[in-house]
C-alpha cells in the first residue's frame, strides 16, 4: 500500500464498536484522530440509519455513509440521498408481512420494528437460544433507539432489516422484489432465525466508496475499508485495500487483503498501525 493520502472507511457494529454499542474503545478513537492528523479522511460506512449514528458523530468523522449507502454526508454536504419511492415502500412492507418475515424499517430520523418478533421470542423463550436472543434484541433496541412499528407514520424508508423464521419464507419476497432490491443474508443464523437486509439496487456500500472518494478527489485505489460482516462485502471489494476483523464472517475474511485483531482486541488501532495509517 502506497503512503499517499487515504480515505478510510470504517464499519461500526463489530468493527469500530461491539455490535449494538455506541462507545468505540479509546484505542480506536486514538487511531482515527492520528490518521486525520496525518492527512487522511476517516468515514463511517454502516448499515445503520442516520439517526442511529448521532452518538458517534461527536468523534469528528469526515463523513458518514448511512443505510448501506442510501444516504451519504461528507463535511456537512449531502453527497447522496436515495430513499425508496412510495410504490417500492408499499410493496416491500406488504410482501414481507404477508410472508411472515419480521421487519425493522430504517428511516432518516429513526427505526421501527415489528413487535411480533419479540412476542415470538417470549412465547418460545425456553427453546434453544431464544431467551438470549430476546435479551440481545432488547439491548440493541434500547441503545439504538429502535421504536415499535405502531409509531411508524409512513416516513421514507432507506432500508429494511429482516428476521425470518426460515429461508423458505424469504423465497417469495426475493422472487417478487429481486429486480429492484438485493437481499443480503448474513452468514449463519441467530437463534434459528435468518438475519438479513433488503437494500435498493440503486446503491450499496461499494458505490458509496466510489461516491465518497469522488467527493474528496482521491482515487479509489487510495481507499481502505475495514469491516466484519457480509453486508460489508461490496465496500471491501470496491476499496483499494481491504481488512476484515478477526471476529468477522468467514466469507469476508476470504476476500479481504488482510485480517486484523477483533473489536475486543483493539483491532482498528492494530490495523491503522500495521498499514501506516497512524503512527505512535
Image (cartoon, rainbow, N blue to C red):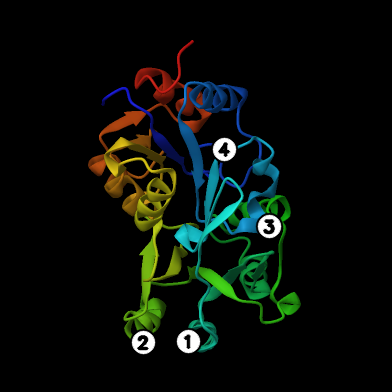
Residue at mark 1 to residue at mark 3: CA–CA distance: 24 Å
Which quarter of the rendered picture does the N terminus lie within?
top left
At label 3, counting other C-alpha atoms closer than 10 Å, the crowd grade (few under 14, some 14-19, many 20 or more) is: some
Residue drawn where x is 71% and y is 50% of the image:
143
Q: Earlier in the sequence, mark 1 or mark 3?
A: 1
Q: Nearer the viewer, mark 4 or mark 3?
A: 4
Name the residue tied to disc 2. Answer: 176
In the picture, the disc for residue 95 is 1
Q: Camera-side residue: 157 or 37?
A: 37
Residue at mark 1 to residue at mark 4: CA–CA distance: 33 Å
At label 2, counting other C-alpha atoms closer than 10 Å, the crowd grade (few under 14, some 14-19, many 20 or more) is: few
**Pointer 4 and pointer 3: residues touching (CB < 8 Å)?**
no
Q: Please, what secondary structure does the residue beneath circle 2 have?
A: helix
Taking the view exactly as shown, the residue that stands out farthest to the front is 217
Describe residue 16's horizontal placement relative to residue 272 as left or right: right
Describe residue 117's horizontal placement relative to residue 249 as left or right: right
Q: Is residue 9 above or below residue 26?
A: below
Taking the view exactly as shown, the residue that stands out farthest to the top is 280
Residue at mark 4 to residue at mark 3: CA–CA distance: 16 Å
Q: Nearer the viewer, mark 3 or mark 2?
A: 2
Residue at mark 2 to residue at mark 1: CA–CA distance: 8 Å
Residue 181: x, y in percent? 38, 75
Name the residue tied to disc 3. Answer: 141
Residue at mark 4 to residue at mark 2: CA–CA distance: 35 Å
Residue at mark 3 to residue at mark 2: CA–CA distance: 29 Å
Name the residue tied to disc 4. Answer: 17
Amino acid at each position: 500500500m502506497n503512503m499517499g493520502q487515504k480515505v478510510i472507511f470504517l464499519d461500526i457494529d463489530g468493527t469500530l464498536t461491539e455490535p449494538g454499542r455506541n462507545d468505540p474503545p479509546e484505542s480506536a478513537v486514538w487511531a482515527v484522530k492520528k490518521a486525520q492528523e496525518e492527512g487522511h479522511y476517516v468515514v463511517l460506512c454502516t448499515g445503520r440509519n442516520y439517526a442511529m449514528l448521532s452518538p458517534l458523530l461527536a468523534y469528528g468523522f469526515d463523513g458518514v455513509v448511512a443505510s448501506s449507502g442510501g444516504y451519504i454526508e461528507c463535511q456537512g454536504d449531502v453527497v447522496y440521498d436515495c430513499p425508496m419511492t412510495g410504490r417500492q415502500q408499499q410493496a416491500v412492507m406488504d410482501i414481507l408481512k404477508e410472508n411472515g418475515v419480521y421487519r425493522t424499517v430504517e428511516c432518516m430520523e429513526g427505526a421501527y420494528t415489528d413487535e411480533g418478533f419479540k412476542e415470538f421470542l417470549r412465547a418460545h423463550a425456553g427453546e434453544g437460544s431464544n431467551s438470549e436472543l430476546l435479551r440481545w434484541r432488547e439491548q440493541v433496541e434500547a441503545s439504538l433507539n429502535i421504536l415499535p412499528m405502531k409509531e411508524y407514520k409512513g416516513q421514507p424508508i432507506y432500508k429494511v432489516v429482516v428476521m425470518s423464521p426460515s429461508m423458505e419464507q424469504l423465497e417469495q419476497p426475493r422472487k417478487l422484489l429481486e429486480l429492484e432490491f438485493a437481499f443480503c443474508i448474513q452468514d449463519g443464523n441467530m437463534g434459528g432465525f435468518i438475519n438479513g437486509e433488503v437494500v435498493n439496487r440503486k446503491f450499496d456500500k461499494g458505490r458509496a466508496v466510489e461516491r465518497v472518494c469522488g467527493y474528496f478527489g482521491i482515487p479509489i485505489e487510495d481507499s481502505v475499508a475495514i469491516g466484519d460482516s457480509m453486508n460489508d462485502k461490496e465496500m471491501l471489494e470496491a476499496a483499494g485495500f481491504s481488512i476484515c476483523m478477526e471476529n468477522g464472517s468467514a466469507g469476508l475474511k476470504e476476500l479481504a487483503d488482510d485480517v486484523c485483531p477483533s473489536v475486543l482486541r483493539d483491532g482498528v488501532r492494530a490495523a491503522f498501525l500495521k498499514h501506516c495509517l497512524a503512527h505512535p
